């Protein structure tokens, strides 16, 4: 096993996750038809767009936090 | 129903034969001793980032999802799209909580959530409650996967009377049971790769071809009645459809990774690293699910349910027939065979993982804990293989003899029940502060009030909570898990003061939760 390093439970980067919770869990923000995009009502393309934004935010958090310490893997 | 579609049926059978072969061949993949439970039931924890992506994707985005979400959109409109915010907000939870759980489970050789709770809290009764909740919530889920197979087999034009009508389902079940028994988790992991490729092809073909057929998305959505196009605006003194939508998404997200089959997928990863990466990669499936939800609207626009050739299908399967009908309506036979095979195989993957997960739970946390305390490794793995057969047989019998709506009701209740394991598992990953008996009482209160609210709401997922003349319709699972946590928080200091002399039992160390 790796040399033990100080457990670091919290990173400020995790706050990026809160953004998507606010933007997708507050339906008044997006519950409307206009503006449409290639004929798709706002309600639908907005939420599909947040799938992509959410994935990007998660990737940012991953790259920002993952370099701290090597990771132990089961492949031994 | 209509005549048998031979071209579609031939493609369907060929693809099924391919994955049957793959399921058995998988026993030799990443070779391990399949007579050990962690090899049979967790694939030896050897799946890297990419295989984990396919496995968890195939595990969570089930055939039933691909049938039921568009069916809900077809029937109820915009509210069905809650599946999208739901699958957005699961990934921060996966990223933050579950690598910790993977670490501690890997360190101590835990295979199930019951193992973790037993080790963390030292209370076999709390672990038993977690275990039974997991098994009971999983059973109707397996049954619903079989419904997915029934719908596409029916849509291929195969019908019969009496036991003959169930023959295709029984054949699929025997194949599933046999390769799960012989290859364990390696079978669904390898099949998931084929299944996911087929599902992606189907989803993109539908999302591109149908709007072209119609002359653009604009024309499709113009044909949707306004009541289905967006959520209804709340009236005075209520949060209306808004709170129902948001709480359904949040509650479902909190419950998802508590299901035994989700945890089995997560624990089979080769590192906590692979899990974090997947939190950023799995939204690929969410995006596809969102596209598939739109298929429900295509079905409304096509007025499929009014076409005479589909009348029998809608009569037999209800709105669940919407996706197969749309594919039959718009695509050539060979593509129908491919996409129906994708759906049917998409049912086998999660059904296999669910039965393995339930078998692991029974073997580790009921049989080993209460019946035979010192099994050999081989006895333990053999027991799990047999239980996986019994679990699947139970699901098959259920779906053949009991009306489908009861499986749907039970699956709904299963979501409300499984979330009650959140304090012990997800909060337990962070803190040993809770008293084990307080957690057990919180669980009991959550299960009882959740069930009562669901019954009071006529077995619908949302309950209208009224406070000071203001109404909050919301997902019962979310309301009752909050109650569960409050009960556990209130009772913990009381129980601790009663048993102040004993230090809490905990096998795990704070450092076990980190890489």
Image: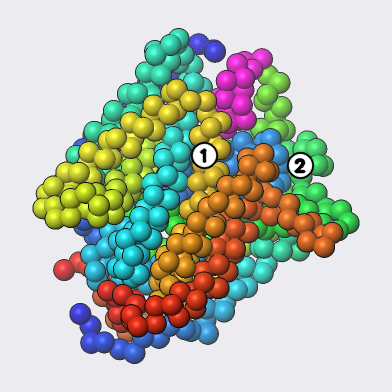
Between the residue at mark 1 and the residue at mark 2, the CA separation in whole angstroms equals 27 Å
Q: Main secondary structure of the magenta part?
A: helix
**Residue occupying the point 67% across, 58% down:** B246
1 vs 2, front mark:
1
Q: Residues within 10 Å of mark 1 (few under 14, many from 20)?
A: many
| Residue designated by label 2 | B228
Indicate the chain on which mark 1 is placed: B
| Quadrant holding the N terminus of chain B | top right
| Residue designated by label 1 | B410
Measuring from the top left, give residue A29's x and y in whole percent.
76, 63
Measuring from the top left, give residue B25's x and y in whole percent.
19, 40
Measuring from the top left, give residue B447's x and y in whole percent.
53, 52
Q: Is residue B136 left or right of residue A27?
A: left
- Colour logic: rainbow
Q: Kindly indicate the quadrant of the structure image that contains residue B337.
A: top left
Which callout, 1 or 2, points at the residue further toward the start of the chain? 2
- Secondary structure at badge 1 equals helix
**Residue occupying the point 45% across, 80% down:** B497
Q: Residue furthest front?
A: B498
- Secondary structure at badge 2 equals helix
Residue B426 visible somewhere in the drawing? no
**Residue occupying the point 71% across, 41% down:** B77
């Amino acid at each position: 096993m790796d040399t033990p390093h100080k457990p670091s439970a919290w990173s400020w980067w995790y706050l990026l996750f809160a953004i998507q919770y606010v933007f997708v869990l507050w339906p008044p923000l997006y519950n409307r038809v206009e503006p449409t995009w290639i004929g798709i009502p706002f309600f639908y393309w907005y939420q599909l767009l947040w799938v992509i934004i959410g994935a990007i935010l998660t990737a940012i958090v991953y790259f920002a936090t993952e370099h701290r310490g090597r990771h132990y893997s089961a492949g031994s | 129903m209509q005549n048998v579609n031979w071209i579609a049926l031939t493609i369907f059978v060929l693809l099924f034969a391919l994955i049957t072969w793959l399921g058995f061949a998988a026993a030799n993949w990443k070779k391990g001793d399949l007579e050990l439970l962690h090899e049979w039931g967790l694939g030896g924890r050897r799946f890297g980032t990419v295989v984990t992506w396919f496995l968890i994707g195939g595990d969570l985005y089930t055939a039933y999802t691909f049938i039921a979400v568009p069916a809900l959109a077809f029937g109820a409109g915009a509210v069905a799209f809650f599946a999208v915010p739901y699958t957005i907000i699961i990934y921060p939870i996966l990223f933050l909580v579950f690598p910790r759980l993977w670490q501690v489970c890997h360190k101590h050789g835990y295979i199930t959530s019951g193992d973790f709770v037993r080790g963390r809290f030292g209370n076999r009764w709390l672990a038993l409650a977690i275990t039974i909740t997991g098994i009971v919530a999983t059973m109707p889920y397996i049954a619903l996967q079989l419904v997915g197979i029934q719908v596409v087999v029916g849509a291929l034009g195969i019908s019969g009377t009496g036991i003959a009508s169930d023959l295709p389902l029984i054949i699929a079940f025997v194949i599933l049971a046999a390769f799960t028994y012989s290859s364990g988790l390696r079978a669904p992991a390898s099949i998931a790769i084929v299944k996911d490729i087929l599902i992606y092809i189907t989803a993109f073909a539908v999302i591109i071809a149908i709007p072209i057929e119609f002359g653009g998305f604009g024309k499709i959505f113009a044909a949707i009645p306004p009541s289905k196009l967006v959520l209804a605006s709340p009236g005075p003194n209520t949060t209306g459809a808004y709170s129902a939508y948001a709480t359904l998404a949040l509650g479902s997200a909190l419950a998802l990774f508590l299901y035994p089959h989700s945890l089995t997928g997560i624990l089979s990863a080769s590192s906590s690293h692979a899990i974090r990466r997947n939190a950023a990669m799995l939204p690929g499936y969410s995006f596809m699910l969102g596209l598939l939800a739109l298929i429900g609207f295509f079905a409304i626009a096509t007025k499929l349910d009014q076409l005479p050739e589909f009348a029998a299908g809608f009569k037999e399967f209800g709105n669940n027939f919407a996706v197969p009908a749309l594919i039959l309506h718009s695509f050539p036979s060979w593509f129908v065979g491919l996409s129906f095979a994708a759906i049917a195989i998409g049912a086998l993957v999660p059904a296999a993982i669910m039965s393995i997960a339930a078998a692991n739970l029974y073997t580790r946390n009921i049989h080993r804990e209460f019946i035979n305390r010192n099994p050999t490794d081989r006895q333990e793995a053999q027991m799990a293989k047999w239980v996986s057969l019994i679990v699947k047989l139970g699901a098959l019998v259920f779906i053949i003899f009991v009306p489908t709506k009861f499986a749907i009701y039970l699956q709904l209740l299963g979501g409300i029940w499984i979330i009650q394991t959140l304090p012990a598992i997800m909060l337990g990953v962070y803190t040993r502060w809770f008293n084990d008996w307080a957690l057990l009482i919180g669980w009991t209160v959550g299960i009882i009030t959740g069930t009562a609210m669901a019954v009071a709401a006529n077995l619908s997922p949302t309950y209208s909570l009224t406070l000071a003349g203001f109404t909050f319709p919301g997902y019962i699972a979310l309301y009752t898990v909050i109650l569960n946590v409050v009960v556990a928080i209130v009772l913990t200091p009381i129980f601790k003061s009663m048993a102040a002399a004993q230090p809490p039992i905990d096998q795990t160390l704070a450092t076990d939760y980190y890489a």
